[in-house]
Image: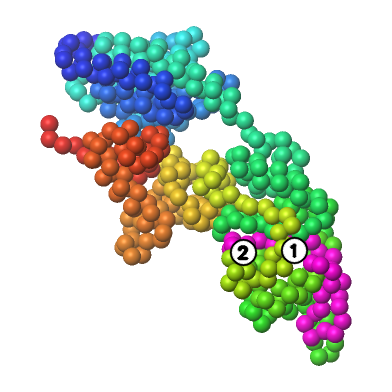
């Protein structure tokens, strides 16, 4: 193994490494710490590609945190699943740094399938931690001629020794904070397909637990696509009426002249009574979607039903008694509708005895990826596809995006992406399957696509203005540094190479 000459460039790289390692304590999350730590050691060793993996202390067969650099998404997937697992296993098992000028020629590794398949050349692999390694550092290829040197081995050892306790403390703190606030509620409630473990979802479920057993109406508010009808179903499924009918009626899709007939039923010329949705929900629950769209005449009839449990079918001459619990949903401001004269104030008072507000996805961003994974699996089952998963690149793109259409927009985007990936006979959804803005003229972009184009442009411009100083760019954009790193990955931004 050749010894690299001690030159000023190496001294400066090692100086930057040690300075950077001292700053790692400032991080509060393992993800951001891993990103910066890997960047430091890759620069110090002149590696072309790097991968840093931290095992879950409770089960080392699973990986909780990882990051890579210099790899395409496809290469990174192979590194995580197949590439050089033999070499990584060697480093973890022996607790020693493994270094080879050519894994294809090294008798320790040349017969391993992962080495043959990926044609691995110069490799340096070091365990992170002591007797029971916390993780592993994997470096391959070099930006400068020659194999990894003794200096690189020393550098990787010192890096691993220094970074291990920092990461261990971060992992320990993360595990202590990683408590699902919805777990106890899920044990007590019937929550089919209610995905999420954020504090916002936990607060919502606590409200549902209190409201569901009560024999009163409920008003569910929230932005479009937040899942208001789903929450209405959950309330019904956890009420005393769960074994009785659940009827859903969208006030926005039926013409004004037919709403009353659909809702309250009607009597024809032969005096035959055609029951409406209230009668169909007898003993159970009626969900009225977008109640702000209900015409004023129908609002008056609904108010009578809510007050007296009586209503008169259209063209009928006598009152009918009904026993259906009402759950109304709206994405409109009903107080504003009252001011405009399109909604009855007395009906609003009757409806808002119990009100549940659904949080938008921007208020529960930690639920976005679990929701996307759920929608991916649901699309696979719905369309009877073979195994399709979200790639790391797709996950980063999903995390970085603003879902103004909330859960409905996210579910539609993921399902469409799964179908595009399956049509190409791929097992992984990539970011290009989710967002296809590069294939469209600017005036044909959706709001989501146009937003991504602008965010990518703004981020690139800010990074170039700050000479790719991520911390400075984060300050200018009023974002966290970790979020800027996620956006760089999500949009595939790379620093342009200037003249030497």
- In the rendered structure, the answer to whether residue 61 lies left or right of residue 205 reads left
Residue projecting furthest to the front: 339
- In the rendered structure, the answer to whether residue 239 lies left or right of residue 459 reads right
Specify few, some or many for label 2: CA neighbours under 10 Å numbering under 14, 14-19, or 20 or more: few
Assign a secondary structure to mark 2: helix
Q: Which residue is mark 1?
A: 350
Write the start and end of the magenta stretch as one range: 306-333
What residue sits 72% from the left and 67% below the top? Answer: 347
What residue sits 41% from the left and 23% below the top? Answer: 26
Residue 436, picture quadrant = bottom left
Residue projecting furthest to the left: 500
Assign a secondary structure to mark 1: helix
Q: Position of residue 121 (x, y in %)?
A: 29, 24
Position above or below: 63 against 153: below
Position above or below: 213 against 29: below
Q: Which residue is mark 2?
A: 335
The answer to which of marks 1 and 2 sits earlier in the sequence is 2
The quarter of the picture where the C terminus appears is top left
- In the rendered structure, the answer to whether residue 86 lies left or right of residue 264 reads left
Residue 70, picture quadrant = top left
Disc 1 and disc 2: Cα gap in Å? 13 Å
Specify few, some or many for label 1: CA neighbours under 10 Å numbering under 14, 14-19, or 20 or more: some
Residue 246 appears in the picture as rendered: no
Q: Nearer the viewer, residue 272 or 207?
A: 207
What residue sits 87% from the left and 71% below the top? Answer: 321
Position above or below: 404 against 74: below
What residue sits 38% from the left and 34% below the top? Answer: 481
Q: Is residue 380 magenta?
A: no
């Amino acid at each position: 193994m050749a010894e690299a000459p001690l030159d000023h460039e190496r001294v400066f790289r090692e100086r930057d490494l040690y300075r950077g390692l001292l700053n790692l304590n400032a991080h509060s999350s393992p993800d951001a710490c891993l990103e910066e730590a890997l960047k430091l050691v890759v620069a110090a060793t002149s590696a072309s590609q790097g991968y840093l993996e931290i095992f879950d202390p409770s089960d080392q067969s699973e990986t909780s945190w990882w990051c890579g650099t210099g790899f395409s998404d496809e290469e990174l997937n192979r590194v995580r699943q197949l590439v050089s697992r033999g070499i990584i296993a060697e480093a973890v098992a022996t607790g020693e740094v493994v270094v080879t000028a050519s894994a294809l020629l090294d008798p320790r590794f040349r017969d391993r399938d992962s080495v043959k398949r990926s044609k691995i050349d110069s490799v340096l692999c070091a365990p992170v931690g002591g007797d029971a390694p916390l993780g592993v550092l994997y470096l391959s290829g070099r930006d400068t001629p020659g194999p990894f040197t003794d200096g690189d081995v020393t550098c990787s050892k010192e890096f691993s020794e220094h970074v291990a306790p920092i990461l261990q403390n971060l992992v320990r703190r993360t595990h202590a904070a990683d408590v699902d606030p919805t777990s106890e509620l899920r044990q007590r409630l019937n929550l089919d397909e209610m995905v999420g473990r954020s504090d916002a979802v936990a607060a919502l479920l606590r409200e549902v637990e209190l409201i569901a057993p009560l024999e009163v109406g409920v008003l569910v508010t929230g932005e479009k696509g937040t899942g208001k009808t789903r929450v209405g179903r959950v309330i019904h499924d956890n009420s005393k009426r769960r074994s009785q009918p659940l009827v859903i009626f969208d006030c926005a899709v039926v013409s004004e002249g037919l709403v009353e007939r659909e809702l309250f039923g009607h009597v024809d010329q032969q005096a035959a009574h055609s029951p409406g949705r209230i009668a169909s929900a007898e003993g159970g629950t009626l969900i009225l979607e977008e109640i702000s769209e209900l015409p004023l005449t129908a609002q008056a009839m609904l108010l009578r039903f809510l007050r007296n449990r009586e209503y008169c079918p259209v063209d009928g001459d006598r009152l009918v008694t009904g026993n259906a619990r009402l759950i109304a949903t709206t994405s409109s401001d009903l107080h504003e509708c009252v001011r405009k004269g399109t909604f009855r104030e007395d009906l609003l008072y009757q409806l808002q005895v119990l009100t549940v507000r659904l949080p938008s996805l921007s208020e529960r961003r930690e639920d976005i990826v679990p929701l996307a994974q759920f929608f991916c699996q649901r699309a696979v089952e719905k369309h009877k596809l073979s195994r399709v998963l979200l790639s790391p690149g797709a996950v980063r793109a999903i995390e970085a995006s603003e879902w103004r259409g909330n859960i409905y927009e996210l579910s539609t985007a993921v399902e469409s992406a799964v179908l595009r990936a399956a049509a190409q006979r791929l097992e992984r959804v990539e970011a290009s399957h989710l967002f296809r803005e590069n294939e469209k003229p600017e005036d044909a972009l959706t709001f989501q696509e146009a937003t991504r184009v602008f965010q990518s442009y703004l981020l690139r411009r800010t990074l170039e203005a700050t000479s790719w100083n991520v911390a400075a760019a984060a300050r200018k954009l009023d974002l966290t540094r970790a979020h800027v790193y996620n956006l760089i990955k999500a949009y595939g931004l790379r620093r342009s190479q200037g003249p030497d």
